[in-house]
Image (cartoon, rainbow, N blue to C red):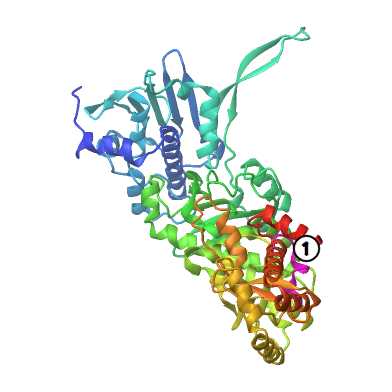
Amino acid sequence: MAKQAFKAESKRLLDMMINSIYSNREIFLRELISNASDAIDKMYYKALTDDSLTFDQKDYYIKIDADKDSRTLKVMDTGIGMTEEELENNLGVIAKSGSLAFKNENEIKDGHDIIGQFGVGFYSAFMVADKVTVITKAFGSDQAYKWESTGADGYTIEPSEKETVGTEIILTIKENTEDESYDEYLEEYRLRSIIKKYSDFIRYPIKMEVTESRLKEGCEDEFEEYKEEQTINSMVPIWKKNKNELTDEDYVNFYQEKHYGFDKPLKHIHIKVDGTIRYNAILFIPENIPFDYYSKEFEKGLELYSSGVLIMEKCADLLPDYFSFVKGMVDSEDLSLNISREILQQDRQLKFIAKNIQSKIKRELENFLKNDRDKYELFYNSFGRQLKFGVYNNFGQDKDVLQDLLLFYSSKEEKLVTLDEYVSRMPEAQKYIYYATGETNERIARMPQTELVADKGYEILYFTEDVDEFAIKMLMSYKDKEFKSVASGDLDIDEESKEKTKAEEKENKGLLDYMKETLSGKVKDVKISTRLKNHPVCLTADGEVSIEMEKILSAMPNNQEVKADKILEINADHEVFQSLKTVFEQDTEKAGLYTNLLYNQALLIEGLPIEDPIEFTNDICKVMV
């Protein structure tokens, strides 16, 4: 029995495969189980074309057996087996797939898709094993064969003994090193966990002897351990079933079994696509926000399967960031099982699936908003912030996708409304979509800047989240209606009031110039207000940076001292202004005192910090005295 060398550049290819294609060692068991499933699939297909062969499901299974004493792990199947020639061709040539050749030759189209088509999965066993032995007996053959190898140096093939048709792969597990523990691949609990993680939906039973305990006969509190053969995998994935066979409870159970969240999902989306690219997906919209959702630790993504075998736990490329709250899985027969994260990023099929999923999620959210408003608002309270981030990110390239999913609190309706609902109620004379920013709805309702807009009977959207105004600035307009802050320089509402204001500014130019000089470096200008009705004073902003934006940016760790160009507006009809005029004519020093008090009053109304609290309190004392 002479040792034969691997064909192709074996050592280099083996090293590349182990170190690059597979990113974690536990994947080897997934590969061997998938190969075993393929072998049984071939028997199933043989039964379809051979009248002398019957395929009884109960006779076909995969068995896992670990022996700590001999440090061996066995993966056995009752599949079609291999001849000597097939051993030579399939295991002697790295990266040649017998399963792929079988699929191409037989044009399999009946749903029993062959999983292992890449041809390198078998060799992942060398990540955990010093030696790999394969004992196999092909269907229709009386002779069994043994293939054995210790790695890239080569392999041997010789006749062997095996009573039944099928294949038995025996791994001699490596000894532990300082950096790696290989004992885990001989532990029952660890093997069960790997099977459940990657191969839970293999269509054939995966059996394993499991340690159980029972009460000793005649003893009240003594237990004895015994071995019991159990089927570890679930076999039939929920996404392969017809939708009309499933209940809401089935979807909730699946959500919880897969540990997608501790809550109940608000909505599920079941997708089945049969076309150029085939895939199934079950997606969930959670009810509650994960505790780490808005942190760096949160990792988005869907579980990605190839024919029921897990490829990746969190495939981020399947979801855009603005839909990162979606949980669930995607299973496609058109994706290769043996595929790395780097290859996936370039995969055309994956990009097609991702685009379809994005469109489906958007449509379902639109239907959710239309048909179940209360539940949609529950969802929006948890994840609306992420949709607004989506509008703002990437320079607004996704704003058209998301704008109709946004909700904001309405001054008129006193509840959350869509932009479409707002625009549909706009009076003909109203030119803009008006909004106001603040910490709470209650605080915004009392803001002086809202007086004129509210007095005209116009609806105001309340922005209470830090991202709101940034998103709207990126959106710019909705259905040809521009957004305008109630604190912006010109509300463009009352032309008559504008003319009156111009006359008053001309009449009081000396006072306004004096106030502007007094507040030099603090405000850009001091003006007579067209928007104030009852309040004496307010701050507005001139330019793209609003006062609310300044507050948000100044609270960030990388504060770059971005400031709004502030305008101090005075209500010329308020009695305070009359007092200010009188004081200015009699005592300019006292007029300066009043000016500083009014400015600090405006800061407090706006929720901005007073620059010198001690000076402010001293000024109040001067007025009182």
Tell me: 185 left or right of 439. left
Residue found at the very far front of the displayed protein: 586
Look at the picture and state if 525 lies above or below 499.
above
Look at the picture and state if 259 lies above or below 607.
above
Residue 121, magenta (yes or no): no
User: Which quadrant would residue 524 be assigned to in this image?
Assistant: bottom right
Decide which of 492, 381 is in the foreground and name it.
492
User: Dot 1: within a 10 Å radius of its alpha carbon, few (fewer than 14), some, or many (20 or more) residues?
Assistant: few
* Residue type marked 1: Val
Inspect this view and state whether residue 1 appears: yes
Residue drawn at (43%, 23%) of the image: 73
x and y, in percent, of residue 55 in the image? 51, 42
Q: What span is colored magenta in the figure?
A: 438-451
User: Which quadrant would residue 211 be assigned to in this image?
Assistant: top right
x and y, in percent, of residue 154 in the image? 22, 28
Tell me: 592 left or right of 561. right
